[in-house]
Amino acid sequence: MTIPRVDLPADARLDTLAVREGLPPSAWGENSEALFLTSSFVHPDAETAARRFANEEDAFIYSRFSNPTVAMLERRLAALEGTGDCIATASGMSAILMIVLGLLKAGDHVVCSQSVFGSTIKLLQDFGRFGVTTSFVAQTDPAAWRAALRPETKLLFAETPSNPLTEVCDIAALAEIAHGAGALLAVDNCFCSPALQRPVEFGADIVMHSGTKFLDGQGRVMAGALCASEELVQTKFVPTQRSAGMSLSPFNAWVVLKGLETLSVRMQAQSARALELARWLEAQPTVERVYHPGLPTHPQHALAMRQQHGVGGAVLSFVARGGRAGAFAVIDAARICSITANLGDTKTTITHPASTSHGRLTEAQRLAAGITQGMIRLSVGLEDVEDLKADLLRGLAARA
């Protein structure tokens, strides 16, 4: 038995793959992907079951590590990212955990951007207890990454654009540094998604996703994924998932599948709104600085435009005058924006990174990453942009 594939033209483009890739329909001929809510699968006889559990026959066995709905999501996301394979996980953080458990051992070393998501920093720091050490370096300085290498370095981990400063790293440069040291490069692609950026085209080995964000797109479920070569997924990550069980539920996989169908149009529309909002914020007297890769004032604007197909993305940050009190005043005055640390939703979200997503870091760590008390992060949704301007102006004008 071999699990069949959808019969698509070999040259099918990204938007087509986002709607069509997966598994063929069942015997019932459903047009929407089927939801297989089952913990296990029945085998015709004991000998067949033995072959399948020994990986001698391709089949669905147990939903902790093999399920048709989850497989549809994995095939679709791998196609969108341009990788040989994909493995879905329960959350974005569990996907990063899978990288560590699947690839590293005591004595190994990681080089990571100091600007990544706060929980990523904490997770890597926690693994110091088990002998896996991490050096944190400036996101945008390839020389700093190279200088941090050690003979035992096995992994470089970057997030581009970063959360929340939207710093953009040179993926190709980091890939060259990693491969020259015999290490792998993993890239968190949550902010862009494959609709805007495909890190493997620049040499990345692993692409990490929190499917909770733009892949779902409506803030409904938790999900994560790793896209990589078939060899890495099958020999390193699948055995880890089979033992550790950081599995994605079939229902959550089905929801993200539905989200992928509209990924490209959402990213384009939300990114356009974010850029207009960023330009408007730059002109506000009570805003000290705006961070968005689509702005010519962004330090890595040219690089971002090359890597992200000319689109800056739907996330921006800005610094309000008055420090923490000024930021809180703007956030609290919002009547449309949702005060929540999630991002990638069709509803615009607003948050104070220093006290939420990066709240578990020390103030020194936050400042090293450029996260000040006056910083506000916006994940721009699909509301009318004029309404969003008015929503922010309520708080900004009060600080004038």
Image (cartoon, rainbow, N blue to C red):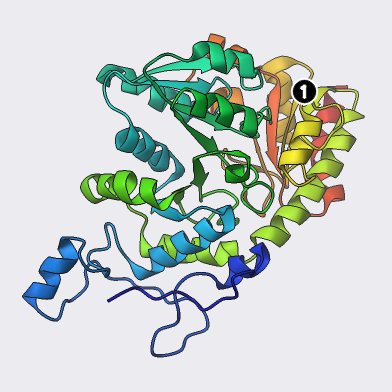
Which image quadrant for residue 160? top right
Residue at 30% x, 47% y: name it: 235
Instruction: From the viewer's perspective, tell me whether residue 69 is left or right of residue 54.
Output: right
Instruction: From the viewer's perspective, tell me whether residue 391 is left or right of residue 76.
Output: right
* Picture quarter with the N terminus: bottom left
Query: Could you tell me which secondary element the residue under label 1 belongs to?
Result: strand
Q: Nearer the viewer, residue 161 or 54?
A: 54
Which image quadrant for residue 59? bottom left
Q: Nearer the viewer, residue 155 or 221?
A: 155
Q: Amino acid at mark 1?
A: Ala
Extreme residue toward the left, this view: 46
Instruction: From the viewer's perspective, tell me whether residue 285 is left or right of residue 314.
Output: right
* Picture quarter with the C terminus: top right
Residue at 22% x, 67% y: name it: 61
Residue carrying label 1: 320
Q: Is residue 4 above or below residue 183?
A: below
- Residue 292 seen: no
Q: How many marks?
A: 1
